[in-house]
Image: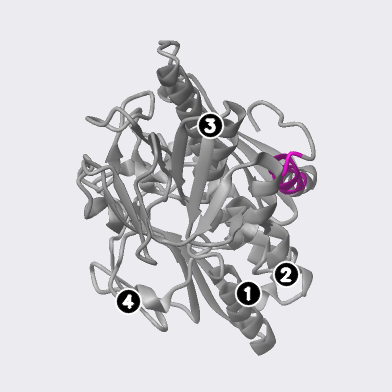
Amino acid sequence: MKKVLVLGGGFAGIESAIYLRKNNFDVTLVSDRDFFYIYPTSIWVPTGETKFKDICVELIKLQDAHGFKIIIDPVRSIEAKEHRVTLKSGRVMDDYDYLVIAIGASKMKAKGIEHTLSICGAPEQSLLIKDRVQELVEKGSGKIAFGFGGNPNDTSAVRGGPGFELLFNVHNLLKKKGIRENYELTFFAPMPKPGARMGEKALKMMDMFFERTMVKKHFGKKIKAFQNDGVIFEDDSKLESDFTMFIPAGDGHEIIKDSDLPKNAAGFVKIDDFCRVEGFEYIYAVGDVAAIEGPEWRAKQGHIAEVMARNAAHNINEQENNADNHKGYQEHLNILCVMDSGDGAAFVYRDEKKAKMIPLPILGHWLKKGWGKYCRLSKLGRIPRIPGL
């Protein structure tokens, strides 16, 4: 039985391990934490609507469900030409036939970033955000800024949706408590039209959301630095804030930048349409770690990471059996999400042919809640997987 080493315990890594096992490979998964974190549902941790433990799935349970082996030990280095991966403990992994890299991305590091917290950062940051929000609720008033940044070297590495969702959920929390009028909520971003990749209709609807929820906008100015009481922009203007939630753009992982793997200008691994790393026949890269090619509006999302993971597993199996029915990821590129607002949601979809945003009052919130439970149970193999979800 051929051996596959999978690096990463997120959406891309877990999906790769599951589907490689379905193809009867001997799979070892290496992760820097002992749980799989369902990031899309973390937006409810800061508002107390969801408990942290409920969006974590223990890797040992996934191992029992699917039969892959797990090693909890961060990756320290990848030496592709030497066919070697070294872990933080010093353990050397070189006994594999195929390598799947799914370690995600690092984050752009703006000056003063330590004065912010991110809903897309380390999982534990969601709890810290909860503490900060609770402090301001107890105070009875305050200014909260929510924002995200971009990476000029790779436009696919922007993740703004969770920022919008957390903003609207905090608005809804304050509204329920009857104290919303005591708070100034502002959304900021360096680009003139944040969310433009979702399409013009979505942009107009987002403006309606901002107006209806009395959220201020601060768009089109580059971020110079963060301070403990606000955000400084390129023209030295300042957005005052008692708490700033900021999602930095993705950047090439430090381990990848230090490796001998081919990289694009942002430091993401160069791959072909079949997710195979350029110049390396037995190495694949999936999810945020990879340089995704395609239209300008392309975005790195969990469902794209999973498509890439399933394709990589399929293509490894094809390669092993000397077959050529390989599957590419680019034909599956789209933007797909249910953007939650705490009291409803909006269905967002975009591909090469169309872009739409459909309001889902009340029902949408519970649909996304249901998806969170579905994600957990389907990953554990307790309910069937629905194609495309």
Q: Position of residue 210 (x, y in %)?
A: 57, 55
Frontmost residue, 225 versus 318 = 318
Frontmost residue, 171 versus 57 = 57
Amino acid under disc 3: Phe
Which quadrant: the C terminus?
top right
Mark 2 or mark 3, which is nearer the start of the sequence?
Answer: 3
Q: Position of residue 336 (x, y in %)?
A: 56, 35
The answer to whether residue 198 is left or right of residue 85 is right
> Above or below — where is 358 with respect to 210?
above
Do the residues under discs 4 and 1 have CB atoms within 8 angstroms? no
Determine the residue positioned at 48% across, 71% down: 117
Determine the residue positioned at 40% across, 19% down: 319
Residue 25, disc: 3
Task: Identify the residue under disc 4.
Answer: 112
| Local crowd size for mark 3, using a 10 Å CA cut-off: few (<14), some (14–19), many (≥20) | many
| Local crowd size for mark 2, using a 10 Å CA cut-off: few (<14), some (14–19), many (≥20) | few
Give the Cα distance between marks 1 and 2.
Answer: 7 Å
Main secondary structure found in the magenta portion: helix
The range drawn in magenta is 370-381
